[in-house]
Image (cartoon, grey):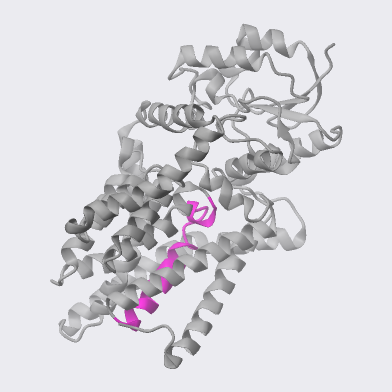
Amino acid sequence: MVKLTDTNTRGPLVWLFTGLFAILLAARLCHADILWADEDYHLAAAIQVLYGKIPYRDFWYDKPFLNIAACLLFAAKTGWLLRLASAIYATLLCGLAYVFASQVWTRREGYAAALLSAFSLTFYFPAPTLTLEPDTLMMLPHLAAVYLAWRGRPLLAGAMAGIATWFNVKGLFVLAACAAFGWGGLPILALGFLIPNAIALGWLAGEHALAGYWQQVWEWGFLYSRSPRPVSAGFKSLLNWTGFHAALGLVTAVYFTRKSAERRAFGIWFAVSFAGTAIGLRFAPRYLDQLLPPLWILGARGAVLLRSESKPRVLRAALTIALGIALAIPTVRFGPRYFLLARDELAGVPHRWIDVLMDQDSQAAARLIASSSQPGDTVFIWGYRPGLIAYTRLAVGSRIWDSQPLTGVPADRHFLSDQPVVPLWAAENRRELIASRPTFVADGLSFFNPKLDPHRFPEVAHWLENYCVIGSTTMTVVYRWCGP
């Protein structure tokens, strides 16, 4: 077992992680002026907490609240501070991967785990792993929980699995993976899991937010996951992800070719993690983050075994070439985008990449709102554009602050469909909305889907009669209260 206090280890480790942090930070600073989908929502929610609001009770938030807590660590700022936080978090993941792999095997596996994790946290752009959102934020407690379970610390492992569920409800799969490392410790593991959950649920109950938490995170999340989506699209997404992570898959496959005492437990960890990604058969790239921790650890061992002298020389050469090709694919595909983004950043010109057009429109709409806003003003968004709140840093003017709960159409399909998954609930939420009076209303959905224009909902159309258009961008119309 490697001791991290060993003077022979400390020097190389300092250089390794200093270099990895520099690379991870540089990769993220290339897009410091952009907010990617899925990260802006949690920043916007954290800004509401800074106004003294409680999630689930005072504003709609359909994710576990530790994502908000993570954003509060850097005051929910955008720009370079957000990217610095992301780089620090990624470096912590690399460090924990090193500790885990080096203690299971040797220092070589530790180095391999750190390098594999840093590579996959960089070269899948625009990766969910570049941003701070639930599937990414859950990776640290996920990795820590399984590491502690392997160390024979079921109470702490259960506690970390419990913490993971307050980043992402799929932390339940982390608990199942931990069970594979010691069936005899299941009662203690369950106790550890219950402790953070009891604390969190108790706090929500004390803040009268428990019913809202159940409705928004669990009921809405269930409706979201079971709503129709072509299965072929999910498997296409899985195939694409597998292609870009082929290097991790290759070295992990090498690991499973060698019998070992820990292979059964690690195999269960891998299988359970894959099951967590397969809910609803959507296989969105961010869902597949749950598979990365076992791939890093098992792949690190496989990478060392790949060079084993016990293998025929021709086979070793072939595997090494295949690994090089697998690493080159995401590097060539996504690496140049960093340079393009950095070039635009240094030149001070707008990015011309189609993936960032909506974010640039949100920035333009935020500037329009800011030009006429005053202290105490509030905002409501028709559509799913939380970046508007992250950029304006305004409080939301109602408990429901985007149109998903009002139309009943989730954000992953409201550009193309107008079919609600829960029409009665949506109608009830619209009645709640029209009792509020936000200062600004930003319609960022009608441009994409006229069938979900707010004027097509009679009660909302009547409510909007109290608002006047103050300007528009390419994709967003901004209204300001002008009623009595």
Tell me the residue at 62%/29% (across/down). Answer: 58
- Confirm whether the magenta stretch covers residue 218: no
Regarding residue 270, the answer to whether it shows in the image is no
Q: Is residue 100 above or below residue 278?
A: below
Looking at this view, name the residue that lies furthest to the left. Answer: 259
Q: Is residue 376 above or below residue 302?
A: above
The percent position of residue 259, horizontal first and vertical second, equals: 13, 71
Q: Quadrant of the N terminus?
A: bottom left
The percent position of residue 197, horizontal first and vertical second, equals: 41, 44
Tell me the residue at 72%/50% (across/down). Answer: 350
Q: Main secondary structure of the magenta part?
A: helix
The percent position of residue 202, horizontal first and vertical second, equals: 47, 39
Task: Read off the magenta span.
Answer: 106-132
Q: Nearer the viewer, residue 193 or 263?
A: 193
Which picture quadrant has residue 403? top right
Q: Nearer the viewer, residue 456 or 395?
A: 395
Q: Is residue 308 above or below residue 423?
A: below
Q: Nearer the viewer, residue 242 or 37?
A: 37
Q: Is residue 442 left or right of residue 109?
A: right
Q: Is residue 335 above or below residue 376?
A: below
Which picture quadrant has residue 159? bottom left
Q: Is residue 253 left or right of residue 376?
A: left
Tell me the residue at 35%/69% (across/down). Answer: 325
Q: Is residue 399 left or right of residue 164?
A: right
- Confirm whether the magenta stretch covers residue 113: yes
Q: Quadrant of the C terminus?
A: top right
Regarding residue 208, the answer to whether it shows in the image is yes
Tell me the residue at 41%/43% (across/down). Answer: 198
The percent position of residue 480, horizontal first and vertical second, equals: 80, 23
